[in-house]
Image (tube, helix red, strand yellow):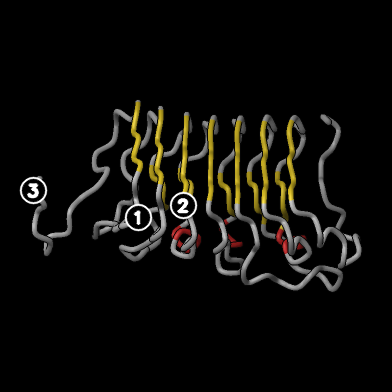
Amino acid sequence: MDNIEILWDNQVAAESFHKLKSLSVYGCNKLVNIVPSCILGRLRSLESLEVGSCGSLEVVFKHQPLSLLDGHPVAHFPLKKLKLDGLPELKCVWDEKLHSQDKFQRLHSIIVSSCKSLNFLFPASIAMHLTQLEELEIYECGVVELIEKEGLVSRDVFPRLISLKLKYLIELKCIYKGTHALCWPALKTLEVHGCDKVEILASQPENEIPLHK
């Protein structure tokens, strides 16, 4: 649908789309964002979001000032699965101004591929609230760091992460450029391919005794 420029009309009634569980958007080359903040309060049942082959898309979750017709701001967005593919102009997944307003604590699967302009995936303020994240896969993106270096996160960010797959991230240098190691006690699968610029993938806290086989 190359002529569509927006998905949501700001004048839509406040109770619209509250039962929507799954949204897939593909081949809409004029869209520059998918979910403005003014619609988040209405999507109270949305569990799956897939976006692909949208050549002009710059941000997925876009901040917009709330009006009287908008739904109430959400503290816990219900999204569980996020899949992004073939978005060459994507600059960020979450708008910078959106960070302190909306939490995505129920996300458990994130798959991102072929997003060449994406330099980092998570703002620190989003990453530290992803307590249910179990699966993270990133392929062929311009990511330099997974978590934005300007923010601070605790060492137990992503405490339930089970599977991490990083493939052909030619600009990737590290997971997080912080002063402490990250602790992922639930991690079972780690795959890293074609990430030749990685400087530090994982480090051991200084106060821990090295483990021997």
Q: Tell me which residue sits at (72%, 52%) in the image.
A: 35
**On the image, numbered disc 2 is attached to which residue?**
134
Task: Give the mark nearer the N terminus: 1 vs 3.
Answer: 1
82 to 181, vertically: above or below:
above
Amino acid type for the residue under numbered disc 2 = Glu
Comparing 3 with 129, the one in front is 129
Q: Which residue is mark 1?
A: 186
- Residues at circles 1 and 2 in contact by the CB criterion of under 8 Å: yes
Q: Badge 1, how many Cα within 10 Å: few under 14, some, many 20+?
A: few
The image quadrant that residue 206 belongs to is bottom left
Q: Alpha carbon of mark 1 to alpha carbon of mark 2: how far?
A: 9 Å
Counting residues from the start of the chain, the first of labels 3 and 2 encountered is 2
- SS category of the residue bearing label 2: loop
Specify the amino acid type for callout 1: Ala
Location of residue 97 with respect to 118 vertically, above or below: below
- Residue at left offset 28%, top offset 36%: 198
* Residue 45 figure quarter: bottom right
Secondary element at tag 3:
loop
From the image, tell me which residue sits under label 3.
Answer: 212
